[in-house]
Amino acid sequence: MTVAMKDHEDETVSSTASGWLVLLESGDATAEDRRRFAEWLAADPMHSLAYREAERFWIGLDTLNRQDIRDFDHYLEDDTSVAPIARRTSRRHLTAVAATLLLMTALGLWLAAIWYPRGDYHTATGEQQTITLADGSTVQLNTNSALSVTMTGTARRLTLHRGEAFFTVAPDTARPFEVTAGNGTIRALGTAFNVRTDQDRVTVTVTEHSITVRTTQDTSAEIHAGTRITYRSDGRFGQMEPADVARTLAWQRHRLIFENQPLADVLEELARYRSVWILFRDPSLRRLAVTGSFDTERLDRLLPTIEESLPIRTLQLTDRLILLYRDRPKQH
């Protein structure tokens, strides 16, 4: 029993060390983060040892790239002239690489659980939820989203920490309805609008009446029904433009709709609904155009469907790790 507990503790320390390494290497660590990290290091000599191990592992990933790509190629070519021993060696190394990449994926999921705010309401990857607020307004949360709500006698304030949500606002002239997302705040009285957060931008699409958006740059814009606007992480607005409302809200019908969009964008959208990591063996594949409509509840069919229409092949190494590479010319 003591040994099992010790193993669990060692695993927890290693995971925490890896989490600190990713945060510090990301460039997003604050002074408070660095202070907490110093306290964690000083708390136990094992913490320093675990952190140095994490650093060695991280640096070692850089040495995998070229050789691993050759091993992937060698495996995928399925050359019957390769000696059995060499083939077994290649497969063993391929398995080791897959395990390393899977570890990185698991680490990313662990970090998301630790560092991402959960809010009062939240959805998991692939999950949706409809919330009725105390004032009669409703919020539909899309996949992997988190929302906090504060209702008082004079204000209605919400924060979309991450993800996407559609707000249908109950009229109340005495209490403006405000949604903070990224570096901006959307203000409405009675209307309906969609807010989507991405890594470097927030997109607001209005479907009824109008709203006002103010950013940290202390600039504002009024958005009317049928239009959308994007603002960046630095608070600057993009250009206001007509919105394809049906396509924007297709997620409410469990659909993803693409029209001549790059394959990289399509697969990035797929990753919002499924915990999957897709690696491009050939970077030129990222630019292939995709048109189609897909069911978010049957996304297991998305890659096979694309594979039938584009010159690509996929190799699924694990449930969450897929290699994508250019298909070889068909033999006639």
Image: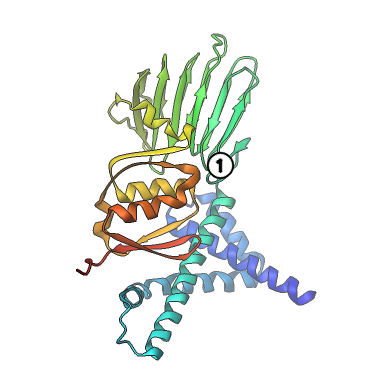
The answer to whether 280 is drawn above or below residue 267 in the figure is: below
> Which residue lies most toward the front here?
332
Q: Residue sitting at 61 percent across and 14 percent down?
A: 154
Where is residue 268 shown, x and y percent of the image? Answer: 39, 49
- The quarter of the displayed image where residue 124 is located: top right
Left or right placement of residue 163 versus residue 234 in this view: right
- Using the rendered image of the protein, determine whether residue 259 is visible from the camera's viewpoint: yes
Where is residue 31 shown, x and y percent of the image? Answer: 51, 50
Query: In the image, what residue type sits under mark 1?
Result: Glu
Left or right placement of residue 282 versus residue 318 in this view: left
Left or right placement of residue 279 versus residue 328 in this view: right
Q: Which residue is tagged 1?
A: 127
Q: Residue sitting at 45 percent across and 81 percent down?
A: 92
> Which residue lies most toward the top here?
173
> Which residue lies most toward the left here?
332
Number of callouts in the render? 1
- The quarter of the displayed image where residue 174 is located: top right
The answer to whether 209 is drawn above or below residue 228 in the figure is: above
The answer to whether 188 is drawn above or below residue 202 in the figure is: above
Which of these two is toward me, 309 or 150?
Answer: 309
